[in-house]
Image: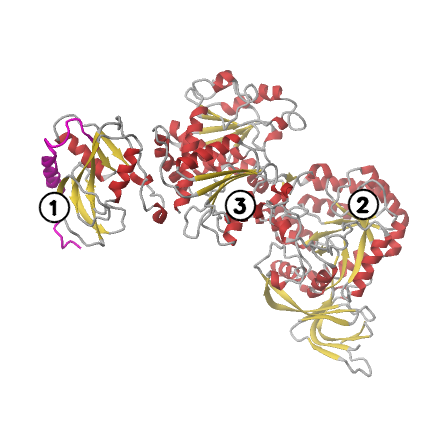
């Protein structure tokens, strides 16, 4: 079964998932992002790489943050960007997902940035384009259901690499609702691919997926135990709908056991960094003192996010 | 492959420095096009009189062959640690051929600000221009076949040498 | 119509027949095997040299999509698919639209099927009205109209008390009940087996114990009511173990597995292949191995296709949104042969699972070639291979995980009631 992300000569055709991407490909994306970080510090933040290309931001799930970062990234590459918010589901409009794609292809799309509530939607689109002989159109997964958020995973890797250098010496903890998190899944794939010494997931049983160890992680139910000696702590967002009901009794109880406080952070290494994909729920998964404190690299993550997305788009568009 | 007698890089560099000495602005910035031009700019900064701030430029994001060849695998970061606005800039490159790299470098510099002037210094001018670009300071002129590429290498001890390679091996433009 | 099927390898699992012989058919029945009947002048002679001659396959679960889902498939196309696959009898689940909860619907279906001169169709009636899980159906009326059993198809029957009463009622009159063992609340929202694959792919999942918990409930109700239950579409290793233990303890239950689960597991979903979105979900390799072992030792009585034609639009969606199901009538025989070869199982034992055993479970005197039996016969070439392509399938459902695969076993002739209804 050929990896649908790679073309027949091994070039990155789409970015659908970090799973199965060779470490050299990941490394190249991270290396390419470095100069793009500097570009952001110039007055003219544009480079002409994607001039004349049309990038469609296809968001089937609302997300102003992610959509905006992709838009900024594409515009800094001089691309033309069209934003399409299709709301809950294209089928409520009577048009199928693939019909929407076909219509946009007819409008000379060069790249689709896709966010969808269902796992596998970007894969379906990539396959459809391939079957229709439109393999020159690239698909970037901006988050599909619980499955993956590869650009977030890449920017998380970039951030860790920026502050910590060698993955092979690091212990990284991912805390919170791993079960529903595409961010966690992508990051785990990225970290294990790059040879991270130990990847931990910390959360209650209700929020950890079945057989998650098979992804190459160590499971901790106790946050204090799990944080001991960590170099990197990644806090996941707890969505509102999870905060009460059969998965968790309340946000308060979650914060008590799994919230990151200054106190708990002391268990990690003294130079540990704290990350969060955003947006944060202060007082639920993370204390404000930590979010705004010296260990936090949450704001740089955002800057790196634009550079990483520029790197992804420029590598894809050049292939 | 070597019917052509390649000049010695160090000697040619000396000649280039001689031509530039006294001619360049006292506060000119030396901006080398990565990677050969950057090595040369570093050496020139030491060989010329006066203080010449150094910068290096990677033109990968401004090349005109992106659509055909995609993004190069190894990228360096453009570093211009001075105010481009109003500066006298000497762009330094190892081999001047079609002129496309220089065009890209000029476009890139202008995205940092509006320089007062840009002059071009190259170690080797091999002719074959495809754009209206000329160097003010040239170390040596050379004619080689189209299927051959001239590359500048830096030895372990820091000294420079020129070599010929089959074209398409990522070298000069 | 006198038909002579000459020199084939005749396999009749029920009677333990496996030898080269000639089969003689007259007046819609098997006249003789081996010895020429007196005064024999055949209207047609079929040369079966090198071919297998066996009872027509009996598929206990094939959705014909009428009434209500004619845009997915019709009786015409699906009946053609059945005989192309060597299937001469089939039972269809009640989840049509409307569900088969009224005698009139059942009669219409039977009538329509009969007029197509294809396989025998045995409708399975709805256990509750509208398959809503609230009120039991008029099982007496439905049986008179032609239902051979009652089931809830894949619809949830969450109220255990309703299930209990339905089973009591069925037991009173000796009606058979077919049940899917799946706890409705544990399976809610799930589309894949709860394991490594679903975790990696981020798919909402159904734990294996959704099946085992339901099985335990069903077994208790069987003990309490004495109803004859058939467990449809087993999928877990623990489930197989439960059934094995229950049978050993003397509980009168039978069960089946869908042919897809004999071959595939959750890993085959690959990159979200919606053709692998099935109900029950494809489970782990361990579960698949247990299903095979269950077939080998008789814990699992029979194999069916669970034929479910799905239109392309409904499959070309993200995995969880795609409609579950796979087309199967034309793949039941080849996939059974494939399984037999992989397990080095003798052909008669393998064929029993799609002929004699389904007949026994359905309570039919068919699926065999004894003298006087209905001449429902399948003649196939076990060594011919064919490629699964949409154009090669008669079914309107082209939805199969086996697209592009090479299959062993090509049906050459299918006879129903002594008439040749398919030849190729």
Left or right: residue B105 compared with residue A181: left
Q: Nearer the viewer, residue B119 or C325?
A: B119
Left or right: residue A111 compared with residue B78: right
Q: Nearer the viewer, residue A290 or A15?
A: A15
Mark 3 — residue?
A123
Rendered image quadrant of residue A272: top left
Magenta residues, start to end = B1-30
| Pointers 2 and 1 in contact (C-beta within 8 Å) | no
Query: Residue shown at 43%/32% (left/top)?
Result: A306
Determine which of the numbered discs, if any, sits on residue A180 in the image. Answer: none
Count of labels in the image: 3
Q: Is residue C22 above or below residue C117?
A: below
Q: Is residue A127 above or below residue B158?
A: below
| Pointers 1 and 3 in contact (C-beta within 8 Å) | no
Q: Which chain does tag 2 point to?
A: C
Residue A284 percent coordinates (x, y): 57, 21
Tell me, yes or no, if residue A309 can be seen here: no
Determine which of the numbered discs, if any, sits on residue B7 in the image. Answer: 1
Instruction: Tell whether position B121 is magenta.
Output: no
Q: Give the quadrant of the N terminus of chain C.
A: bottom right
Q: Give the quadrant of the C terminus of chain C.
A: bottom right
Residue C109 percent coordinates (x, y): 81, 58
Left or right: residue A139 compared with residue B37: right
Mark 2 — residue?
C130
Instruction: Tell me the crowding category of disc 3: few under 14, some 14 to 19, or many 20 or more residues within 10 angstroms, Cα based.
Output: many
Gap in angstroms between the C-alphas marked 2 and 3: 37 Å
Residue B151 percent coordinates (x, y): 21, 45
Rendered image quadrant of residue C342: bottom right
Q: Nearer the viewer, residue A200 or B26?
A: B26
């Amino acid at each position: 079964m050929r990896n649908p992300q790679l073309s027949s000569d091994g070039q990155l055709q789409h970015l659908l998932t970090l799973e199965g991407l060779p470490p050299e490909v990941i490394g190249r994306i991270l290396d390419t992002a470095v100069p793009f970080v500097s570009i952001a510090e110039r007055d003219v933040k544009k480079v002409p790489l994607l001039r004349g290309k049309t990038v469609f931001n296809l968001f089937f799930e609302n997300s102003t943050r992610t959509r905006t970062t992709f838009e900024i990234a594409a515009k800094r590459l001089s691309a033309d960007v069209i934003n399409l918010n299709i709301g809950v589901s294209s089928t409520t409009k009577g048009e199928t997902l693939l019909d929407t794609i076909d219509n946009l292809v007819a409008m000379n799309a060069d790249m689709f940035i896709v966010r969808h509530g269902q796992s596998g939607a970007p894969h379906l689109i990539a396959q459809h384009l391939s079957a229709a002989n439109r393999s020159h159109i690239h698909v970037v997964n901006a988050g599909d259901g619980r499955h993956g958020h590869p650009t977030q995973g890449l920017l998380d890797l970039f951030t860790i690499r920026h502050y910590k250098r060698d993955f092979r010496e690091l212990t990284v903890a991912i805390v919170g609702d791993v079960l529903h998190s595409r961010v966690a899944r992508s990051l785990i794939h990225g970290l294990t691919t790059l040879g991270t010494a130990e990847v931990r997931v910390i959360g209650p049983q209700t929020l950890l997926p079945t057989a998650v160890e098979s992804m190459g992680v160590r499971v901790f139910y106790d946050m204090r135990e799990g944080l001991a000696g960590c170099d990197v702590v990644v806090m996941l967002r707890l969505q509102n709908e999870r905060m009460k009901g059969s998965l968790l009794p309340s946000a308060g109880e979650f914060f008590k056991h799994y919230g990151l406080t200054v106190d708990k952070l002391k268990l990690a290494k003294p130079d540990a960094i704290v990350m969060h994909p955003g947006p944060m729920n202060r007082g639920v998964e993370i204390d404000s003192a930590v979010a705004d404190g010296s260990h936090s690299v949450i704001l740089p993550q955002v800057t790196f996010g634009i550079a990483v997305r520029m790197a992804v788009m420029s590598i894809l568009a050049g292939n | 492959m070597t019917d052509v007698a390649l000049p010695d890089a160090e000697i040619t560099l000396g000649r280039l420095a001689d031509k530039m000495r006294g001619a360049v602005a006292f506060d000119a910035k030396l901006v080398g096009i990565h990677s050969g031009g950057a090595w040369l700019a570093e050496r020139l900064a030491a060989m010329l009189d006066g203080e010449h701030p150094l910068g290096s430029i990677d033109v990968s994001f401004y090349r005109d062959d992106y659509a055909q060849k995609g993004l190069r695998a190894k990228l360096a970061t453009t570093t211009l640690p001075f105010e481009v606005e109003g500066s006298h800039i000497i762009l330094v490159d190892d081999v001047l051929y079609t002129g496309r790299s220089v065009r890209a470098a000029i476009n890139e510099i202008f995205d940092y600000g509006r320089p007062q002037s840009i002059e071009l210094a190259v170690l080797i001018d091999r002719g074959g221009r495809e754009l209206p670009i000329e160097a003010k300071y040239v170390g040596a002129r050379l004619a080689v076949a189209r299927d051959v590429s001239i590359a500048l290498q830096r030895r372990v001890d820091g000294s420079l040498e020129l070599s010929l390679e089959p074209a398409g091996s990522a070298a000069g433009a | 119509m006198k038909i002579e099927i000459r020199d084939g390898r005749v396999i009749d699992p029920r009677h333990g027949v496996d030898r080269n012989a000639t089969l003689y058919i007259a007046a819609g029945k098997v006249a003789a095997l081996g010895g020429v009947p007196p005064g024999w002048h055949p209207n047609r002679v079929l040369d079966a040299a090198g071919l297998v001659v066996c009872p027509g396959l009996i598929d206990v679960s094939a959705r014909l999509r009428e009434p209500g889902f004619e845009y997915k498939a019709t009786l015409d196309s699906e009946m053609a698919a059945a005989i192309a696959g060597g299937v001469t009898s089939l039972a269809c689940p009640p989840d049509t639209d409307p569900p088969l909860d009224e005698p009139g619907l059942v009669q219409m279906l039977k009538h329509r099927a009969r007029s197509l001169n294809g396989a025998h169709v045995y409708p399975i009636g709805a256990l509750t009205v509208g398959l809503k899980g609230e009120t039991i159906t008029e099982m007496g009326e439905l049986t008179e109209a032609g239902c051979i059993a009652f089931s809830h198809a894949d619809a949830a029957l969450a109220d255990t008390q309703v299930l209990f009463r339905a089973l009591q009622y069925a037991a009173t009159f000796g009606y058979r009940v077919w049940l899917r063992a799946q706890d409705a609340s544990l399976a809610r929202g799930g589309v894949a087996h709860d394991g490594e694959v679903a975790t990696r792919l981020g798919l909402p999942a159904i734990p294996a114990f959704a099946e085992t918990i339901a099985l335990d409930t069903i077994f208790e109700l069987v003990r309490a009511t004495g109803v004859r239950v058939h467990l449809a579409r087993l999928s877990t290793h623990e489930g197989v173990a439960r059934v094995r233990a229950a049978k050993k303890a003397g509980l009168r239950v039978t069960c089946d597995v869908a042919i897809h689960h004999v071959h595939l597991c959750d890993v085959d979903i690959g990159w979200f292949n919606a053709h692998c979105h099935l109900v029950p979900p494809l489970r782990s390799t361990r579960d698949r191995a247990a299903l095979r072992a269950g077939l080998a030792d008789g814990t699992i009585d029979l194999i069916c296709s669970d034929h479910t034609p799905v239109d392309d639009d409904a499959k070309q969606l993200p995995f969880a949104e795609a409609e579950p199901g796979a087309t199967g009538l034309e793949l039941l025989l080849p996939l059974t042969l494939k399984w037999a070869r992989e397990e080095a199982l003798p052909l008669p034992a393998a064929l029993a699972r799609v002929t004699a055993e389904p007949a026994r479970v359905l309570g039919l005197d068919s699926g065999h070639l004894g003298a006087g039996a209905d001449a429902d016969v399948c003649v196939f070439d076990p060594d011919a291979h064919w490629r699964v392509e949409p154009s090669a399938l008669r079914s309107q459902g082209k939805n199969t995980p086996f697209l592009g695969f090479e299959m062993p076993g090509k049906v050459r002739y299918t006879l129903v009631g002594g008439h040749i209804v398919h030849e190729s």
